[in-house]
Amino acid sequence: MRDLFEDLFATEPTDPMTAARTAMKPQLRHRFYEAVAVVPQAEGSFAIHLDNRPIRTPARGLLALPNAALAEAVAAEWRAQGEVVDPASMPLTRLANTVVDGVIAVVPEVAAEVEKYLASDLLFYRADAPAGLIERQAAHWDPILAWARETVGARFVLGEGVMFVPQPEAALAAMAAIIPREPWRLAGVHAVTTLTGSAVIALALAHGGLDTGAAWAAAHVDEDWNMEFWGRDSLALDRRQRREAEMRAAAMVLDLTR
């Protein structure tokens, strides 16, 4: 049983930065268990048992979740598997593995990577044409920047095109101060940041400034605009669907650890 547990996710990187950027090819195995249970642990966490055996991460850590609600959500992914177990359909489990094997040990480094995104955040760089795209960016992005300004006191500078625009140190410091240091919430913020290209979007989502649907739409304004004019590519849509599943898993972690 041990080999089956670990081999399912064995090829996934334990480093959280690498895991967030790598599209893993799933290693499918026939389903080898019947019952899935959430089991409280002495230290207050919750493990997932398959046929009375605890799930272990690729690095041999115990897959333990910080609360019962999140553990039940992970357990639901295992219950939903059919004849084969497909890691690609288990974004919560994959994110949990990353937290246990990676984020917990390197919290300052992960927080620093989120902070780096703030200096050149997606929301700061606006199109100079056409008018429709300019309006759409403003409609999706301006409310998020207004949240940062009104809630956090962060006032950012906008620019057109891709030329770097220096941001006020006070604004960057104000946003950096609200990056979570609790590993599970930090992992959720990091995942959303890398998936959207915006730490501002991720932090607004983490702190209740917008919901998951609005965050996803804001991150894809330019992509959606281009698809409307140039059509939809099936491979790109498949990749987008996988990324959206990862995004929703991260958002669920943020919601269930709030």
Image (tube, rainbow, N blue to C red):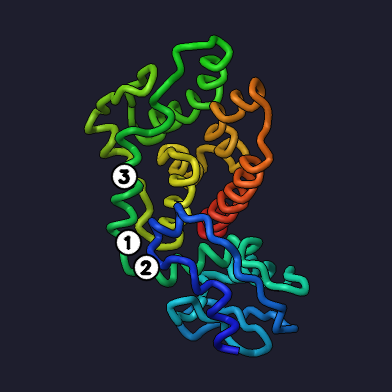
| Sequence-wise first label, 2 or 3 | 2
Amino acid on which the number 1 mark rests in the picture? Val
Q: Classify mark 1: helix, strand or loop.
A: helix
Task: Answer left or right for 214 relative to 162.
Answer: right
- Residue 152 figure quarter: top left
The residue shown at (54%, 32%) is 218
Q: Position of residue 51 (x, y in %)?
A: 68, 88
Amino acid on which the number 3 mark rests in the picture? Glu
Q: Position of residue 95 (x, y in %)?
A: 51, 62
Q: Disc number at residue 107?
A: 1
Mark 2 — residue?
A: 104
| Circle 3 Cα neighbour tier, 10 Å, few/some/many (<14 / 14–19 / ≥20) | many
The residue shown at (40%, 41%) is 199
Q: Disc 2 versus disc 1: distance between alpha carbons?
A: 6 Å
- Residue 78 figure quarter: bottom right
Mark 3 — residue?
A: 115
Residue 69 in sight: no
Marks 2 and 1 in Cβ contact (< 8 Å) = yes
Q: Disc 1 versus disc 3: distance between alpha carbons?
A: 12 Å
Q: Classify mark 3: helix, strand or loop.
A: helix
Amino acid on which the number 2 mark rests in the picture? Ile
Task: Answer left or right for 153 relative to 57.
Answer: left
| Sequence-wise first label, 1 or 3 | 1
| Circle 1 Cα neighbour tier, 10 Å, few/some/many (<14 / 14–19 / ≥20) | some
Q: Disc number at residue 207?
A: none
Q: Position of residue 128 (x, y in %)?
A: 44, 12
